Image (spheres, rainbow, N blue to C red):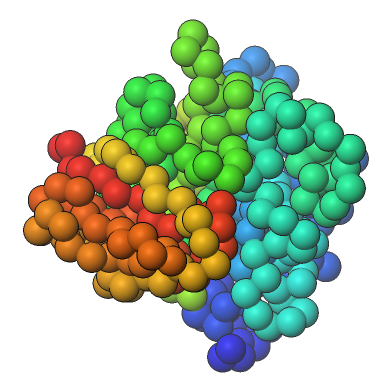
Amino acid sequence: MPMASENSSAADRAAAGTGPALGDFPPTNCGTPYVWRFDSPAPGPVLMISAAVHGNEVCGVHAIKTLLDCAITPQTGTIILALANPDAYAAHLARGGVNRYVDQDMNRLWADDMLAQPAGDCETRRCQDLLPFLQATDFLLDLHSMTLEGPPLVLTGLMPRARQFAEQLCIGDYLIADPGHAAGRRMRDFGRFCGPNAHHTALLLECGQHQSPEAVAVALRACLRLLGFFGHKIPEKLEKTMQEQFHLGAVKDPPVPQQVVTITDTITVRTDNYRYLGPKKALHTVTETGTLIARDGDRAITTPYPDCILLMPALQASPGQTAVRLGRLSR
């Protein structure tokens, strides 16, 4: 892993695969480590921005640190900032590796039955710590990054209101309507955000490749668009940081036209002999039907229709994990 000095910019540190030390963050102000809650006396929605659900995804950590450094305060309602899995993030920094989690993938644990089980491992305990904050949240922005290179992607789930919200925020080049994973429920799929008669909404933003400096800018800009959408004042210091470090306006850049991909198939690994054979890109279109993209034991995995989009394929995966998602461009 390349090295970055303590005085490096967020973009430089992200390119080196690292981020701010946990000791650089202020103490919690709400009793839960690495969670910060800011309340306005005026009523309004509760916004939550989470990062580091996976320990090796540093772009959101930089975004949270920048928001804290610039003293974001709500004009109405509440803003919650959270490092979701600080133990996994600390392990990633200490080992210089790709520590996504300590015991199990935190982004597969958000079903009610999983949250209710005894907390016998690091990630389950942390999910239970975060549960009261999720239960109070009206709008969640969950920041992630990807192993493979690709454009910013917003995973909206299947509720139309989530796609509409992503369109209103103008974040993500592609909006991905997907049902999630067979292995378990993501934070963005937490029950509060998927009810048919509620306004509660969650977006999972894949900001770019793990070590892409642009991923930090994407994460920050998405945070600021979320805050600006609800009328929260953006500090001048934060605008200056965006301009000086990334040569980008925080919320004033013209939005990128968004395309919508509807996931039709989620391929789950069945054997210990899974091999991905397709292009190593986070998003790629295969023009011909029947193109071989992976093998899983004796099973050949092929594209089921023309112009099939491969989404975030796993180069390595174990039984029960998602191998690749297949989708169609619907707009």
Toward the front, the furthest residue is 298
**Total tally of numbered discs in the picture:** 0
Q: Is residue 148 above or below residue 242?
A: below
Whether residue 75 is visible: no
Residue 87: where, in percent of width, then height?
79, 62
Residue 114: where, in percent of width, then height?
74, 35
Name the quadrant of the N terminus: bottom right
Whether residue 263 is visible: yes
Instruction: From the viewer's side, name the closer residue of 30 and 56.
Output: 56
Instruction: From the viewer's side, name the closer residue of 291 and 264.
Output: 291
The residue depicted at 53 percent of the width and 16 percent of the height is 195
Instruction: From the viewer's side, name the closer residue of 3 and 65.
Output: 3
The residue depicted at 55 percent of the width and 36 percent of the height is 188
Residue 223: where, in percent of width, then height?
50, 46
The residue depicted at 59 percent of the width and 38 percent of the height is 185
**Relative side of 193 to 282, left or right:** right
Image quadrant where residue 246 sits: bottom left
The residue depicted at 88 percent of the width and 42 percent of the height is 119
Q: Is residue 42 above or below residue 251?
A: above
Residue 263: where, in percent of width, then height?
31, 41
**Relative side of 270 to 156, left or right:** right
Q: Is residue 86 above or below residue 56?
A: above
Toward the top, the furthest residue is 197
Image quadrant where residue 9 sits: bottom right
